[in-house]
Amino acid sequence: MNNKICVITGCSAGIGKQVAIQLAKMDYTILMLVRDSEKSRLAYDDIRTQSNSQNIKMFYVDLSSPDSIKSAAEEIKDEYSKIDVLINNAGVLKRNLELGYEGYEITTVVNYFAPFLLTSLLRPLLEKSTHGRIINLSSELYKKGEAKLSKFASDKKFDGNKAYADSKLLIILFTKELAQKVKDKNITVNAIHPGVVGTDVFREYPKWLNRLLNMFISKPEDGAKPIVHLATSSDVSNVTGEYFSKSQRSKTIDIANDEKIARQIWQETESILDIRNQQSRV
């Protein structure tokens, strides 16, 4: 595994941090895409200590800002000629309405627009790998989602769980469409539900509820294992365009298999994010 390079978003805590530790133990170079915060710096030290690896690098990014994502991608391209694995792990689940880029609700911005843009910008580096792998975190809640990119209607009541479900369905559609686009580039693209795991995604909920949830859900260490398997195992080296529930391939519902909708959403997203111009400036 020497010289393998992995980019991970949202690895200052939870699943992402555990994935970073486990991959670093396997001699992967870890590029942490995290917020500029004391929490991130502490996680950086902890990952290095627990993995006994010095091959850890931090890049600061605000995933709610396309400009910040573009800057982080530029920094990575300046320092590395290729990457082997991209894990789009970061995500949010909001209790209250918060608008972000171009007036879109922040859950869509962070959970969907950010991985779409970051992947588009780093794709040239993945194409230089002998075998690139892209892993997108999703959730079984995608089954309750709608495939749409409309801005939040001010006359509607905000439902954070619904917004989260929508974003996770969009990620699966993105995964399937991207897998088709890079099938001749020696890159695999898969989505994964790592199980119900205690992570920072629940950070806006009351502490008592977090404590209660933690009694019934898996630990981040367990949630990390199927992601590490997908990132490293030869068993899945040729598997692409699939959705995994933990370590098992799982059939997706009809809407997630609709190629026409996937292409339409892709085109809308490229237009919203001005992808072609973003790529030309990096």
Image: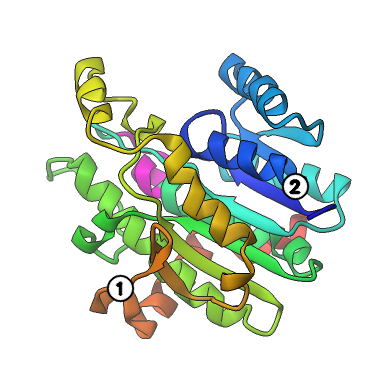
Magenta region: which residues? 98-108
Quarter holding residue 239? bottom right
Q: Is residue 63 left or right of residue 248?
A: right
Which x, y percent locates residue 168?
35, 56
Q: Residue at x 20, y 24 (%)?
A: 212
Query: Which numbered tag is attached to residue 252?
Result: 1
Q: Is 102 included in the stretch rendered in magenta?
A: yes
**The N terminus - image quarter:** bottom right
**The C terminus - image quarter:** bottom right
Q: Residue at x 63, y 17 (%)?
A: 42
Q: Amino acid at mark 1?
A: Thr
**For mark 2, what is the residue?**
28
Label 1 environment density (alpha carbons within 10 Å; few <14, some 14–19, many ≥20): some
Q: Is residue 103 left or right of residue 184?
A: left
- Residue 253 is at least partly visible in this image: yes
- Residue 153 is at least partly visible in this image: no
Q: Is residue 27 above or below residue 188?
A: above
Which x, y percent locates residue 128?
81, 68
Q: How is the image coloured?
A: rainbow
Q: Residue at x 60, y 78 (%)?
A: 238
Number of numbered labels in the structure image: 2
Q: Nearer the viewer, residue 185 or 46?
A: 46
Q: Amino acid at mark 2?
A: Tyr
Q: Nearer the viewer, residue 7 or 102?
A: 7
Q: Is residue 170 above or below residue 54?
A: below
Which x, y percent locates residue 217?
28, 37
Look at the numbered discs 1 and 2 and tell me whether their residues touch, using CB distance below 8 Å. Answer: no
